[in-house]
Amino acid sequence: SILPLPPQPSDRLVFVTDSLNVRQCSECLPQPTLAVDAFESAVLQLYGPASGNQVEDFRLASYSLTNLQELLDAPEDNQFVADDLDFADWIILSVTDNSRGQTALISRFLRERPELALNKNIIVFSFGAPYYFDTTTLSKFTAYYVLYSKQPQFVDAAVRLLFQEVRPTGASPVSIPAVGYDLISVMSPDPDQIIPLILD
């Protein structure tokens, strides 16, 4: 009921990805945990002109969280980011962790530039822990999915969730205080249950 339809062929999608370069070893070259265009590439591969033609590349745009911060810090120099967000029908945000205050940045964006998120589907994918957003920020999301891994297969799974090819299942394995989800309460036995004892 929250998302009655997936993105339509005429919709514009903007992906804002938490892209961080990491090294596997001291001599290794830096590699992104998630590429800036990871979602866009997966969407085109799964639903683009060669795979069902549900989306067209000119209706997609990809930015990093760094671009989002630059927009907030220097809006005059980053108007192109604001324009893409303004014309978007869907804003898809992805977070890998919170070591650099990524969730605070997303909260700041929604607080300082609410006009860019008005009447849009705001979808958030967390590839790390789900409990960093506060209640106010969570209330502004259309949907919030947690996948717990940054591997490419999980990006594909996120895209399939976005286009409603698969239905999400499962429950959080950790508490999320902002939505009143307490793992101990959820896992507590039903006090009204009756467990029969049988002597064999």
Image (spheres, rainbow, N blue to C red):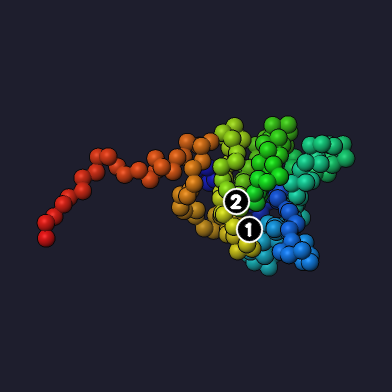
| Quadrant of the snapshot with the C terminus | bottom left
* Residue carrying label 1: 150
Q: Is residue 46 above or below residue 78?
A: below
Q: Nearer the viewer, residue 49 or 199?
A: 199
Q: In the rendered structure, are the residues bearing label 2 and label 1 in contact, judged by CB atoms less than 8 Å apart? A: yes
Give x and y (percent) for residue 145.
56, 49
Give the quadrant of residue 103.
top right
Amino acid found under the numbered disc labelled 1: Lys
Q: Nearer the viewer, residue 22 or 78?
A: 22
Give x and y (percent) for residue 101.
69, 42
Residue in the picture at 35% in, 43% down: 188
Q: Earlier in the sequence, mark 2 or mark 1?
A: 2
On screen, residue 78 versus residue 50, left or right, reads right
Bin the neighbour count of mark 1 within 10 Å (Cα to Cα): few under 14, some 14-19, many 20 and up: some
Give x and y (percent) for residue 154.
59, 60
Q: Residue 128: which disc?
A: 2
Residue in the picture at 73% in, 54% down: 20
As helix, strand or loop, the secondary structure at mark 1 comes to: loop
On screen, residue 26 versus residue 162, left or right, reads right
Give x and y (percent) for residue 174.
49, 46
Q: Can residue 198 be seen?
A: yes
On screen, residue 194 versus residue 149, left or right, reads left
